[in-house]
Structures are given as structure tokens and as C-alpha cells.
Image: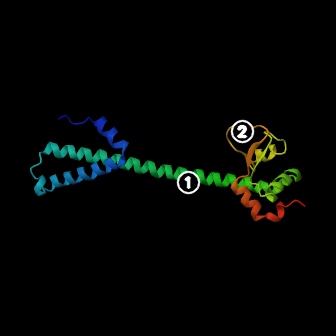
Amino acid sequence: MQLPTLKEFTEAMSANWRSALAAGFASSLTTAGSIYRWPLLKDLPSWVALIFFIVAIFSWSIVLANLVGKVASSIQLAIKRSKYRSARKKVVEKLHRLPEEQHRVMAHHFEQNKQSFTAKFNQPELEPLLALGLVEIVPGTHNRLRWPYIIPDDVWAEMDDHRDNFTIK
């Protein structure tokens, strides 16, 4: 029987960190048993104990690298979410500074309780609202005369919170 090469071992362990964790525990216990002369392992040849020691080192390295990677990706995700929320908050703030015509379009859809609606593709009244992020185009293939648009949930919630400001007078 031939032992796996170092490269094969590292590839196998990095593919699944749980395997590396199990190998790390088993190899560490076997190494400790050899060092402290536990009854079942007291006759273990020193070269086998050395192999288990090396496996333990690589296994724990892989587990540690995966742990650091998970922590780093969690931090990145938290930063992305924070930036997204901040950007969306700025978009929602623009809702209260709209020119009369754009305000009327938003108020019309709010009064009709139509968070999603259809209109001509590139309708001039909607272009400024699209540019501000207050209205979004629904992706996909659609008829140019009845293109679906949607008012994002955060914008809709802001309009709902200030419903007196979004009634047509």
C-alpha cells in the first residue's frame, strides 16, 4: 500500500474541512497516545507516530485556514450589507425631494396601491425615477408596450410611513 503524497493529502483535506477536522483530532490523539505511551499505542513505531504528527499539523492548518476564510467572508458580507443599506437609505431620502411631476407619479401608484405596474419601455415620466433608484425595471423578456416596473420595498415602506405626503391633492 502506498501512502498519499503531500499534495494529494492537502487537496483532499481542503476539499472538505470537516474531514480535516476529523483527521486532526484522530492524528492528534494518536500522536499524544504514542508520546504518553497509552497501552494500545505503546508499541507504535516512531515513523508511524511521525506520520500521524505531520497529518495532525496539516489537518489543523487546513481547519484554521478555513476558519479564517469563513470569518473574513462574514466580515466582508457585513460590510457589503452595511454599504447597501446606506445606499438604499440615500435613495429613500430622495423620495422627499422629488419635483412635482415625479412626486405625482409616485403618489398615483401609491394611491392605486400598485407597487408593481406596467408602462411603455423607456417612458419619459419614469426615466428620472429609474435614475434615482425609486423605480426599478423587472428583468426578463417583456412586451415593449407593457413593460413591468416595480417600486422597491424600502421606497414603498417610506411612502407608507408618510402616506399623507403621497396623496394626490
**Residue 96 image-quadrant placement:** bottom right
**Pointer 1 or 2: first along the chain:** 1
Does residue 45 appear left or right of residue 169 in this picture?
Answer: left
Give the percent coordinates (x, y) of residue 28.
Answer: 24, 52
For label 1, the SS is helix
Q: Label 1 sits on what residue type? A: Ala
- Please name the residue that numbered disc 2 is placed on: 142
Give the percent coordinates (x, y) of residue 117.
Answer: 76, 49
Q: Are marks 1 and 2 in contact (CB under 8 Å)?
A: no
Give the percent coordinates (x, y) of residue 164.
Answer: 83, 65
**Which quadrant would the N terminus be assigned to in this image?**
top left
How far apart are the two marked residues, 1 and 2, measured between alpha carbons?
A: 35 Å
Name the mark on residue 104. none
Determine crowd level at label 2: few under 14, some 14-19, many 20+ residues with C-alpha closer than 10 A.
Answer: few
- Please name the residue that numbered disc 1 is placed on: 78
**Which quadrant would the C terminus be assigned to in this image?**
bottom right
**Residue 4 image-quadrant placement:** top left
Q: Look at 79% across and 47% down and name the residue there.
A: 129
Does residue 48 appear left or right of residue 128 in this picture?
Answer: left
Give the percent coordinates (x, y) of residue 163.
Answer: 80, 64
Determine crowd level at label 1: few under 14, some 14-19, many 20+ residues with C-alpha closer than 10 A.
Answer: few
Q: Look at 11% across and 45% down and name the residue there.
A: 45
Nearer to us: label 1 or label 2: 2
Q: Label 2 sits on what residue type? A: His
Q: Look at 33% across and 43% down and name the residue there.
A: 13
Does residue 8 appear left or right of residue 30 in this picture?
Answer: right
Identify which residue, 139 or 31, lies in the foreground: 139
Q: Look at 78% across and 64% down and name the residue there.
A: 162
**Residue 93 image-quadrant placement:** bottom right
Identify which residue, 45 or 167, lies in the foreground: 167
For label 2, the SS is loop
